Amino acid sequence: MPQLPDDLNAVAVRTWCSLALEALGRERAEIDAINVYPIADGDTGTNLYLTVESAAAAVEAVFAAHETGATAPATADAVRAMAHGALIGARGNSGTILAQLLRGMAGVLVDGGDAAHLSLALARAADAARRAVAHPVEGTVLTVATAAAESAAEVEASADGSADLCAVVHAAHTGALAALAKTPEQLAVLGRAGVVDAGGRGLVAVLGALVETVTGQAPARSPRTGPGRTPAPVDGGSVVGLPVGGTPVEGDVTSGPAGAGPPDCPEDGGTGPAFEVIYLLEAGDEQVARLRTRLDALGDSLVVVGGDGLWHVHVHVDDAGAAVEAGVEAGRPYRIRITHFATESGHDLRVQAEPAQRAVVVVVPGDGLAGLCTEAGATTVIARPGEPPASGELVDAIRRAHAREVVLLPNDAALRHTAAAAAEQARSEGVRVALVPTRAAVQGIAALAVHEPDRGFDEDVVAMTAAAGATRYAELAVAERQSWTMAGICQAGDILGLIDGDVAVIGADVPATARTVLDRMLAAGGELVTLVLGEDVPDALADALEEHVREGHLAVDTVVYRGGHQRAPLLIGVE
């Protein structure tokens, strides 16, 4: 039996993320089914799952990068990764609020993970989430978060600062569960549907995973309610909640009349804004304050979370273009996602185009290659430095490709499992998906170059797989610290030449290291060299390397692409 943690250290944070992902995976469909507020679009459970998936992946990356193996990463690194991962991967209204809750907790947990710090973290999280929402409404995930924090604080206060971690997490979960059961009394749309708040239920699942992390035992499941059913008993007691058709309590809604949703939010699938707009934004605090005001005038369900120059923006609007333009004026928006509610709900009356027979979805490390692949007819997903795409983003790209058959090129060995999960999800939706296990962008380029949509699917996949497999790949990187490598000891600032994923060359500058890497790769033969230059790499380097190949290796051609903002200054392919 694994040892239970005395505090929320890095290992406990990792376990919590993993268990929360499992819990949301089990309950995702049920949470989707009770999603009636603020929009009855049936995706709250899925959005929460994808948000936590991104948080868990970020924490796993911290552990993977930890080189000593003898000790775990610092707790601060793990909680910051959890918060950052949730921020960049947040989906939907509830996912965005959950990201802010985790960010609020991380701000305290970096200093300690004992009972007192956890109690304070829950309070900060609830406060941060409320401040992030333009018009907070009771009977939602905000209410559940506040109740969790208050219950934890009561236990901590009654113990005069000596409460243990188990008592605090149990109190938080119990308080959240009780508040969840009362949400139909506070929000009329929930009461009429006979369900609890979907986002609140998701938060209870996340807190339940925290209980299991600390105590080793999973708590009782959340109230199982759905259309036409009354809320279930809590912890074996009497029914706590509002029977269908009951009367809401008064004065519990902070925006709008008692017992109703806010004036600008639709209920029961009524007419509301047509689009959900989500994007990440690089901007300063001042610009974001102005952005909040502008977006609040454009629509509703506005949630802006983040800080330190990176923000996640979520809003429901009729004019999606204006919402994006507001982001452009405030800073640099990216990972822009626009969803038409009617289309997502299956009620769009417009004639839909017939799906194409075949498409290619490719993950690329920068804007430059995204443009190149788009010109070649592929649907692209950009993997920005430190922000690998989650499976949900890949599934979205497969859907956007709108084809009966899809070839998926992940272009990164670390995305193998993520891509496999996305492929499986797409197959369950009736799309025939083949995953070509490309491990680098240059392998993806080679595969895309031989793609022929008019030939048989299996034949096309075999040809693309063969082209990728025949392409050796390399990249240059800058060493961040002194480390042991397969090529010897490197110092911080050294240029590393990685061939097929392993450090093969340690150099002092990019040009010399690149020449050495090319010579080693071409020693085994080759007909074509592909160079992908990073954003700040001058064209002169490409010219010099092309001349080096021409002089030293006869009958070898060289092609050069601009990769834009990518992690590596130079990517190399030899086929």
Image (cartoon, rainbow, N blue to C red):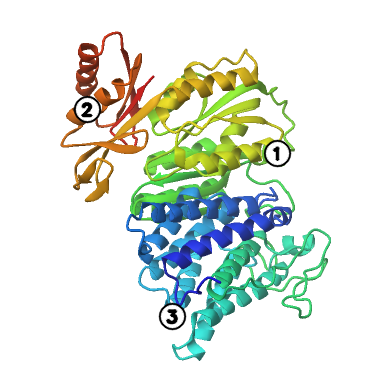
In the depicted structure, whether residue 111 falls above or below residue 424: below
Q: What residue type is labelled 2?
A: Thr
Q: Which circle's residue, 1 or 3, is located before the other in the chain?
A: 3
Q: Residues within 10 Å of mark 2 (few under 14, many from 20)?
A: some
Name the residue that disc number 3 marks.
116
Marks 2 and 1 in Cβ contact (< 8 Å): no
| Location of the N terminus (image quadrant) | bottom right
Q: Which mark is residue 370?
A: none
The residue that disc 2 covers is: 516
Task: Say whether disc 2 or disc 3 marks the residue closer to the N-terminus.
Answer: 3
Q: Distance between the residues labelled 2 and 3?
A: 55 Å
Q: Name the residue under label 1.
A: 428
Against 113, is 373 above or below? above
Q: Which three-letter amino acid code belongs to the residue tagged 3?
A: Ala
Residue sitting nearer the eye, 456 or 119: 456
**Of tags 2 and 3, which is closer to the observer?**
2
